[in-house]
């Protein structure tokens, strides 16, 4: 897939290329088979430099709805980021709130 880079929102073209992590895709697909979710971003868009998005290891999911939160709480083990945001870990995939408006979903912890 084509990937962007830090600063992509400034108008430069996305020229990177990376393989999407199949464990990530499988897990998000499994969740999507149970609850409705919206994917905001995979490898495109403006993320931090070196972001896992540009390595094929992360997706952003629209602000979680009640059904998604219930699903994650029922199927995940929980841990916390350093700033105390919860991280839901399902089959090795980590879900956490990012910037208050979406879930960042990643193959590894921070
Ligand atoms: Zn993200």
Image (cartoon, grey):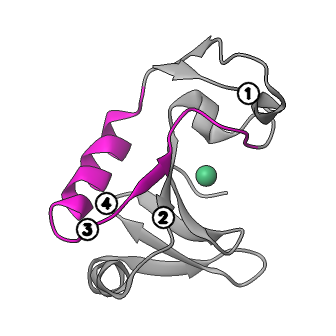
Q: CA distance from mark 4 to mark 1?
A: 28 Å
Q: Which residue shows up at 59% across the image and 33% down it?
A: 44
**Which image quarter holds the N terminus?**
top left
Q: Which residue is mark 2?
A: 62
> Which secondary structure, mark 3?
loop
Mark in the foreground, 4 or 1: 1
Mark in the foreground, 2 or 4: 2
Q: Earlier in the sequence, mark 2 or mark 4?
A: 2
The circle on residue 5 is 1
Q: CA distance from mark 3 to mark 4?
A: 19 Å
Q: Which residue is mark 4?
A: 91
> Which secondary structure, mark 2?
strand
Q: Earlier in the sequence, mark 3 or mark 1?
A: 1
Mark in the foreground, 3 or 1: 3
Q: Earlier in the sequence, mark 2 or mark 1?
A: 1
Is 83 situated above or below 58?
below
The circle on residue 19 is none
**Which image quarter holds the C terminus?**
bottom right
Mark in the foreground, 3 or 4: 3
Q: Earlier in the sequence, mark 3 or mark 2?
A: 3
Classify 10 Å Cα crowding around label 1: few (below 14), some (14-19), many (20 and above). Answer: many
Q: Which residue is mark 3?
A: 36
């Amino acid at each position: 897939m084509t990937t962007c880079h830090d600063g992509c929102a400034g108008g430069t073209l996305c020229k990177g290329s990376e393989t999407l992590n199949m464990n990530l895709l499988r897990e998000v697909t499994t969740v999507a088979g149970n609850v409705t979710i919206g994917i905001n971003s995979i490898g495109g868009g403006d993320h931090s430099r070196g972001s896992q998005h540009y390595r094929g290891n992360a997706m952003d999911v629209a602000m979680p709805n009640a059904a998604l939160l219930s699903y994650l709480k029922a199927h995940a083990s929980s841990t916390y980021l350093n700033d105390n945001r919860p991280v839901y870990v399902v089959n090795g995939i980590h879900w956490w709130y990012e910037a208050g408006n979406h879930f960042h979903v990643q193959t590894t912890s921070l």
